[in-house]
Amino acid sequence: ADADPIYREYINTIGRDSNNRTYPDALNRLGDCLFHERKFQEASEIYAQVAQLKSIGADYALMQNGYAQGLMHHYAQKVDVLTSLTELYPRSDYADDALYEIARAQLQQDQNEEAINTYQSLLQKYPKSNQAAKSSLELGMTYRTLKQYNNATNTFKTTIEHYAGTEAAYAALEGLEQ
């Protein structure tokens, strides 16, 4: 909104100085302004510039670009962008979120088996993640959608045991009752 022209002016003033650590951050903030204004294509292009710099904030830019791609219903691109994040920055704070969003985009494309693999990967690599309980539940739901009822039941039970007290555990209990 009002910050958009300020960031653009700052970016133009400092130019593409690779030694200036504020440049990628300013680009990310501009991307955030555009994202907030629901200008997802423009935001995506800005985030892609930051990702290409491979500097501080590149993982954030990839995550935001993935969200933007999803909001534009470009699910294959979302998967590609977020896969880049998990491969380039496996220790990023966003890596678990990226896997979760990859699985959801795969479901949007009816790639259920791929989504199962992605959920399993998230649960294996990041069992304590804030996305783990939801991933476990959604893994069980995906199994049920595929009529793999034994896998669904086992996954729902695991969700209840490992994530007791969470909304996902309560939903998994409902899944068992169906």
Image: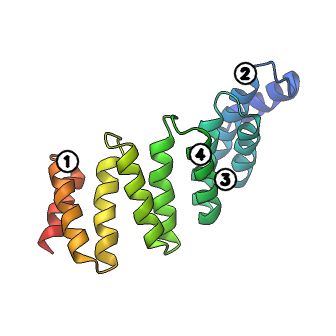
Residue 37: which numbered mark, if any?
none
The image shows residue 73 at horizontal and vertical percentages of 60, 65
Residue 84: give x, y in percent of width and height. Answer: 63, 48
Who comes first in sequence, dot 3 or dot 4? 3
Any part of residue 73 in sight: no
The disc placed on residue 162 is: 1
Task: Say which of 69 and 6 sits in front.
Answer: 69
Name the front one of labels 2 and 3: 2
Q: In the displayed structure, would residue 128 be above or below residue 74?
A: above
The answer to whether 14 is drawn above or below residue 95 in the figure is above
Tell me the SS state at disc 1: helix
Are the two marked residues, 2 and 1, in contact with CB atoms closer than 8 angstroms? no
Disc 4 to disc 2, how far (Cα)? 25 Å
Dot 2 or dot 3: first in sequence order is: 2
Query: Tag 2's secondary structure?
Result: helix
Do the numbered discs 1 and 3 sit on residues whose CB atoms are within 8 Å?
Answer: no
Label 3: which secondary element? helix
Q: Position of residue 175 (x, y in %)?
A: 19, 68
Would you name the residue on which mark 4 appears?
87
- Tell me, yes or no, whether the two marked residues, 3 and 4, touch with CB atoms within 8 Å: no
Mark 1 vs mark 3, foreground winner is 1
Q: Is residue 84 left or right of residue 145?
A: right
Q: Amino acid at mark 1?
A: His
Q: Which residue is mark 3?
A: 40
Q: Tell me the residue at 49%/72% (across/down).
A: 111
Q: Quadrant of the C terminus?
A: bottom left
Measured Cα–Cα span from mark 1 to mark 3: 37 Å
The label number, if any, that marks residue 22 in the structure image: 2
Amino acid beneath label 4: Glu
N-terminal label among 2 and 1: 2
Of discs 4 and 2, which sits in the foreground? 4
Circle 4 SS class: helix
